[in-house]
Image (spheres, rainbow, N blue to C red):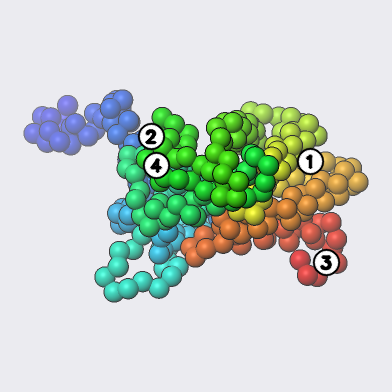
Amino acid sequence: RLLLAMGDISAAKLAHDLIEPSPILAFQFISRLSMNGFSICNAEQKALGVGVYPTASMINHSCRPNAVQTFWLSGSSDHHYPPMLQITMCRDAKEGEEVTISYCDVSAPRHNRRKGLKTNYNFLCDCALCQDTERDDALIGLKCAGSCNGRVRSSSSGLLNIEHTWDENKQYHCEACGYSNFEDSLKAITKLMTRIETIEADLKDDSVHDSIKYSKSMGQDLKQLFDLMSKSYCHPQTSWYVACSSDVFVHWCANALNHISDEDEQLNICHQALSVLEKSRNATKCCYDFEGDLTWLVKRGMEAKLRLFANPVDFDA
């Protein structure tokens, strides 16, 4: 009222909104944070929070970016500083070339990337990687459901309908035997991934007790899902689905070691994790080992820790 009496209408409105927040303002704030915020991660790429950096938020997306965002986390018990965002070029760029970063998991197949970008940012990417159908076929990595072990390719690039899980216009066929009925395989992969994502959400849910998260049955379920994905439906050499199912199981193993006291059981879990890492090594390297992605190095660090846990004198780890 005092501000209104003084004639400062804008200040009065701001003060009113701070005292009695408007649902519209709250929605606008959350929307802007979602669209422009950066997930603040530590050195192991674990998300710690969200920050808004106005200048960096103007950098556009590419599925093969030439820059990567990292964070400097500094401070002590006496002084705390906000995380500093650093944009680093990860490959050579020509003069005048636009600086780009990734807004999504660019290791995933095209339909995953595009669906996420459309849902979260309301645009569809059409960069060079999104037009590379040969690499996308490798990332999906379908196994021939016929009688051979030939390479499965798509016969059209397809356009993504965001109501569908897969590029609905794609038709897959085996180059060796000509088999083309992969509908059941695609449905099975979708079902397996849904189950993996549900378990992954439970593992991150603080309301789920550790005795459930790290139960033997949970580990067995994840191991079975990896085996089905890598043996029945996808090639372990290139498939992102193999790499993803491996990643969830290995992370479960690494965390389970802190919740199991029996040494023999710990070693058993550790050896299972190392076995899955070895089986999925080629797929993981194919998906993650490229300029600007730190995931491959993080996964190699995880493997080194597990090897040292199993054998403290493994100096090659």
Q: Quadrant of residue 202?
A: top right
Percent x, y of residue 51: 41, 48
Q: Amino acid at mark 1?
A: His
Decide: few, some or many residues near mark 2? Use Cα within 10 Å; few <14, some 14-19, many ≥20: some
Mark 1 vs mark 4, foreground winner is 4
Q: Amino acid at mark 4?
A: Gly
Please give the name of the residue rendered at 55% of the width and 32% of the height, measured from the top-left corner.
183
Please give the name of the residue rendered at 41% of the width and 37% of the height, measured from the top-left corner.
169
Element under label 4? loop
Mark 4 vs mark 3, foreground winner is 4
Q: Amino acid at mark 3?
A: Asp
In primary-sequence order, the first of circles 2 and 1 is 2
Pointer 1: what residue? 259
Q: CA distance from mark 2 to mark 1?
A: 43 Å
Pointer 2: what residue? 161
Query: Left or right of 205: which side holds 292?
Result: left
Q: Which mark is residue 158?
A: 4
Decide: few, some or many residues near mark 3? Use Cα within 10 Å; few <14, some 14-19, many ≥20: few
Pointer 3: what residue? 314
